[in-house]
Image: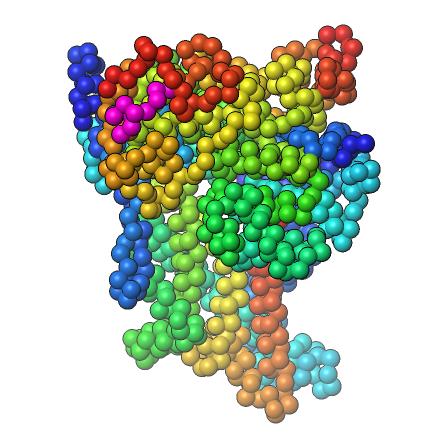
């Protein structure tokens, strides 16, 4: 505990925290992001209604406008949809799924990319060439196309009955397997630089094994940019998820993510119940904006040239 | 009147842990046509002093006190166009790495012609003729062909020759050369130093030679200013400072340089290392490493006092009790 | 290989040199992109970074390799440590051929050879505590039985190199350049090696700190009986450290001789040039004309003797035929046709045999030697 407290102290005294505190935009973005994450994480506790409890839904409450408009019900703050589900609660549950898919696919992409980049950069040769050519091929297609392709293949493999229940995993895989390239290229580049640095050569002359050199010496020194990419990528992954769900190949309507909510709501946009689509869309936009602002700040703060 | 007068110059860097003083109360003069060596170890403030003179201190650093006068006119507070007129036309600069001083996207001819025309009223054709003359002057073979080549087509030594031509072609009266030979091979260093010295002598241009290398100073400078922890430790004619140094730091520095000749059992060494700017000791900044330290050194900061043909900042020479 | 044999003949029985390097070569291929090779028939270019060099280092002695950038001296250091593979030739350490052994293997021998690097800011992992940095070799070779013993050993090493035991808990960035180089030295000697490769260990340091590190290295040599391969471009530093000096130029040894001989009676014109470039702190030779020319691009070195375009004594033979290292004077070997043919005015570098650098303005090229030091070979 003492070391944890000491670490926290040294962090709050450090340059990174100082630069964080000085940037108001970043503080605001982080606060918004933290609130959204908290709301998503605690959705079952904080949501006023359970939109998936069919028994509690009453069609009499369907298509209610937001609370400040005429004919509304104050119990449904952001109104209800055609099935009488509370929009605010749906958004909280949708955020939960969107953020989970985003975070899990970023984690998958980062772990895969860092590993492949490290191995390719350190050993070089044929292994490196193969990894990087695969990366090039992936990069030469639009990311959404690759994600759609992987998505289609995975769905093709799965038996028909399990498609809905496995949708979450399919999404994580198809987004994660599309996005590792950026990590791999960055880490490979840094690894090529670091392995020529004298501290790595010193470790080699001492007789330290390759795996340990990669893990204990190189990895900690190439993780800085990875953190930046991961943050910016979280916004991208959430958007990709939303796009896939919007296109109908993501989360099913029974377990909606933000993208699903937008797709479903989109059908009613011109029938006057705009709140069903506008609020999920605004949430998505604010989420991605907050993540990107945080990522931009992190990139600048970790870049010694801009400090 | 001296060509350049630096008077109680103070350069500060505000940080969130307090203000660092990179140059602290430094005064010296440079006469017309003179080579002044500004010598010190890393962190001594020598480069910062040079940067202050040409107005190239990176913010948030700034000149916090003192004056810099060129021909009697203050140049330390110039901004914008007025600063550009002094920099380049009156004061030329040569930096350590010739690659950073040359734009890789333009031929050396383009860069020379542009510099010449910025400062002198010449047509393009005249400026180009002059650029060829300059390349010949700095010892570049076949200058009429080389003028249309890019910096990467030159070797390290040849690039530094081009940089010298660039610094001198506007006919400045003062050159600030910051470690001009540090990035070069030893056999090329001597050539560049000799060239710089010859060209400046011919044009009566003064040089402030910023370096860590006492050998370069010994070969080139007329006078030397030794800096330590942002302060001036000693200044005087090169022969006096190198052969009969007054300040204990200069003496230690000279003793610690390995020399050709019978091999000693040990080199003279100065204990410890230069303090960081954030914790410079009270009194004389050199006191923790000094072999002649006494009680007053921890309390009183020595002032620059005349000694021989120069001046030294050490309590032993201030009439204080040694 | 006359030199190697003559050295061997002079060697007393039972004291084989610690390191023997013979005909060592390292060629780097500069790869051309695949399409350029196919469409434009471009060949891989070959840089002969080290092009057939021989030397030996006696136990407890220091051999210094000197030369300017691109001469291959640092490549030799890496080859000896196994950081890069040899193209051909032999590296024999204490009787065992290591020419194809990678860094760290075989552990039994590599433990006895360690390296000190040039840049103390790059040679310590910035994210590790000093204690862990110094303990890494101890753990790798399992030299300490327990954690407590390891801690004691790291403390002892820190104090040995002039630091404080409690400095072990700090990170490298909290130290000055000189202190970092001490940490580097502590790491290198933690395995109790016999042999240290030092690649420009003080060229990144300030002079007052350089003196501390050089003194420490000499003390270590005396106390621990270390053998050094000391790479440097600074002849004044080499004069303080070396017993033998090898002068390299574009991948080849041009002169190999006892240190006193190099300074007292330099043979090869390039050695003389290097000696002539040493700045004179007594200011006696101010205003002398510096020797012209630069080191050519190592990708495309001049044929014959690589030095011939800069050499005032070059003849047609120098332009076509690479000279071999041959014994010349006082146990020294030189690779120079002019020296071999006796058409080089012998030089005496002043200063070493007692006395200051001459003040008559004459420099080393072409200075006449006293008769007792005339060429023998």
Q: Is residue C346 left or right of residue A233?
A: left
Q: Looking at the rendering, which quadrant does residue B198 occupy? A: top right
At 36% from the left and 33% from the top, the residue drawn is C311
Answer above or below: position of B146 versus B93. Answer: below
Task: Place residue B71 in its image quadrant.
Answer: top right
Task: Say left or right for C369 vs B88.
Answer: left
Q: In x, y percent, where is residue A30?
A: 62, 59
Q: How is the image coloured?
A: rainbow
Q: Residue B136: where, in percent of width, then height?
A: 54, 46
Q: At x 30% / y 35%, what residue is drawn?
A: C315
For this view, does A222 lie left or right of residue B46? left
Magenta residues span C337-347
Residue C340 on the magenta segment: yes
For the residue pair B285 and B109, the one nearer the viewer reads as B109
Does residue B108 lie above or below A206 as drawn? Answer: below
The residue that appears at 28% across and 17% down in the rendered structure is C375
Residue C334 image offset from top left, x and y in percent: 28, 25
**B316 or C315: nearer the viewer:** C315
Task: Using residue C85 as the reference point, say whether residue A222 is left or right of it.
Answer: right
């Amino acid at each position: 505990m003492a070391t944890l407290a000491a670490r926290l102290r040294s962090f709050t005294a450090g340059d990174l925290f100082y630069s964080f505190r000085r940037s108001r935009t970043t503080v605001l973005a982080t606060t918004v992001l933290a609130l959204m994450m908290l709301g998503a994480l605690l959705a079952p506790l904080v949501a006023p209604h359970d939109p998936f409890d069919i028994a509690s839904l009453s069609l009499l409450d369907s298509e209610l406008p937001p609370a400040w408009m005429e004919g509304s019900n104050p119990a449904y703050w952001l109104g209800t949809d055609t099935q009488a589900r509370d929009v605010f609660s749906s958004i909280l549950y949708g955020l939960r799924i969107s953020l989970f898919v985003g975070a899990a696919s970023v984690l998958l992409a980062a772990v895969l990319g860092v590993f492949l980049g490290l191995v390719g950069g350190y050993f070089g040769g044929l292994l490196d060439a193969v990894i990087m050519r695969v990366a090039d091929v992936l990069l030469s297609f639009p990311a959404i196309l690759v994600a759609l392709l992987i998505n289609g293949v995975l769905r093709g493999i799965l038996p028909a009955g399990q498609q809905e229940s496995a949708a979450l995993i399919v999404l994580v895989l198809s987004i994660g397997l599309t996005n590792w390239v950026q990590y791999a290229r960055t880490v490979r580049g840094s690894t090529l630089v670091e392995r020529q640095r004298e501290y790595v050569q010193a470790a080699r002359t001492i007789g330290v094994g390759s795996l340990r050199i990669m893990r204990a010496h190189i990895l900690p020194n190439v993780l800085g940019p990875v953190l930046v990419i991961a943050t910016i990528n979280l916004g991208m992954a959430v958007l990709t998820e939303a796009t896939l769900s919007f296109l109908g190949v993501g989360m099913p309507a029974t377990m909606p993510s933000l993208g699903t909510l937008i797709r479903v709501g989109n059908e009613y946009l011109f029938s006057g119940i705009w709140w069903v689509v506008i609020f999920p869309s605004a949430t998505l936009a604010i989420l991605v904006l907050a993540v990107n602002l945080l990522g931009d700040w992190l990139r600048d703060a970790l870049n010694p040239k801009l400090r | 009147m001296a060509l350049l007068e630096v008077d109680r110059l103070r350069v500060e860097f505000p940080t969130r842990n307090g203000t660092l003083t990179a140059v602290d109360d430094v005064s010296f003069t440079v006469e017309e046509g003179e080579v002044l060596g500004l010598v010190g170890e890393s962190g001594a403030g020598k480069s910062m002093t040079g940067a202050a003179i040409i107005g190239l201190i990176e913010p948030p650093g700034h000149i916090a006190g003192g004056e810099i006068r060129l021909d009697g006119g203050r140049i330390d507070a110039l901004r914008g166009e007025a600063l550009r007129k002094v920099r380049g036309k009156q004061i030329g600069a040569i930096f350590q790495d010739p690659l950073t001083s040359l734009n890789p996207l333009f031929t050396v001819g383009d860069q020379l012609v542009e510099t010449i025309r910025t400062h002198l009223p010449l047509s393009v054709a005249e400026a180009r003729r002059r650029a060829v003359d300059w390349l010949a002057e700095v010892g570049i073979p076949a200058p009429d062909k080389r003028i249309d080549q890019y910096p990467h087509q030159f070797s390290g030594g040849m690039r530094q020759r081009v940089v010298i031509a660039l610094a001198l072609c506007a006919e400045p009266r003062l050159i600030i050369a910051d470690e001009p030979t540090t990035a070069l091979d030893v056999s090329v260093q001597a050539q560049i130093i000799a060239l710089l010295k010859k060209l400046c002598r011919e044009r009566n241009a003064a040089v402030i030679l910023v370096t860590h290398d006492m050998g370069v100073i010994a070969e080139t400078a007329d006078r030397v200013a030794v800096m330590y922890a942002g302060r001036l430790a000693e200044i005087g004619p090169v022969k006096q400072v190198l052969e009969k140094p007054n300040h204990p730091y200069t003496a230690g520095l000279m003793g610690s340089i390995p020399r050709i000749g019978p091999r000693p059992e040990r080199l003279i060494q100065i204990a410890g290392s230069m303090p960081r700017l954030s914790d410079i000791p009270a009194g004389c900044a050199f006191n923790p490493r000094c072999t002649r330290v006494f009680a007053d050194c921890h309390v009183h900061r020595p002032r620059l006092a005349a000694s021989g043909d120069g001046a030294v900042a050490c309590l032993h020479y201030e009439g204080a009790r040694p | 290989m006359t030199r190697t044999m003559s050295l061997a003949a002079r060697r007393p029985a039972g004291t084989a040199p610690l390191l023997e390097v013979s005909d060592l070569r390292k060629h780097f291929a500069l790869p051309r992109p695949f399409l350029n090779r196919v469409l434009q028939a471009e060949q891989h270019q070959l840089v002969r970074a080290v092009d057939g060099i021989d030397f030996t280092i006696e136990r407890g002695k220091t051999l210094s390799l000197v030369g300017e950038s691109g001469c291959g001296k640092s490549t030799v250091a890496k080859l000896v440590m196994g950081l890069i593979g040899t193209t051909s030739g032999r590296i024999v350490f204490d009787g065992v051929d290591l020419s194809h052994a990678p860094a760290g293997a075989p552990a039994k021998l590599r433990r006895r050879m360690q390296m000190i690097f040039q840049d103390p800011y790059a040679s310590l992992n910035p994210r590790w505590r000093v204690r862990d940095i110094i303990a890494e070799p101890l753990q790798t070779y399992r030299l300490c039985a327990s954690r407590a013993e390891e801690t004691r050993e790291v403390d002892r090493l820190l104090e040995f190199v002039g630091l404080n035991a409690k400095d072990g808990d700090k990170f490298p960035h909290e130290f000055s350049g000189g202190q970092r180089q001490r940490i580097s030295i502590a790491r290198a000697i933690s395995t109790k090696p016999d042999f240290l490769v030092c690649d420009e260990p003080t060229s990144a340091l300030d002079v007052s700190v350089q003196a501390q590190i050089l003194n420490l290295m000499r003390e270590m040599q005396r106390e621990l009986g270390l053998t050094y391969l000391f790479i440097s471009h600074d002849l004044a530093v080499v004069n303080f450290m070396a017993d033998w000096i090898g002068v390299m130029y574009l991948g080849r040894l041009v002169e190999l001789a006892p240190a006193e001989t190099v300074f007292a009676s330099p043979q090869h014109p390039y050695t003389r040039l290097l000696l002539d470039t040493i700045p004179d702190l007594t200011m006696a030779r101010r205003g002398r004309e510096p020797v012209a020319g630069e080191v050519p691009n190592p990708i495309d070195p001049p044929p014959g003797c690589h030095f011939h375009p800069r050499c005032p004594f070059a003849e047609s033979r120098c332009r076509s035929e690479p000279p071999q290292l041959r014994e010349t004077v006082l146990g020294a070997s030189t690779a120079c046709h002019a020296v071999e043919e006796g058409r080089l005015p012998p030089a005496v570098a002043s200063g070493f045999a007692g006395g200051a650098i001459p003040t008559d303005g004459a420099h080393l090229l072409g200075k006449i030697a006293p008769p007792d030091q005339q060429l023998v070979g």
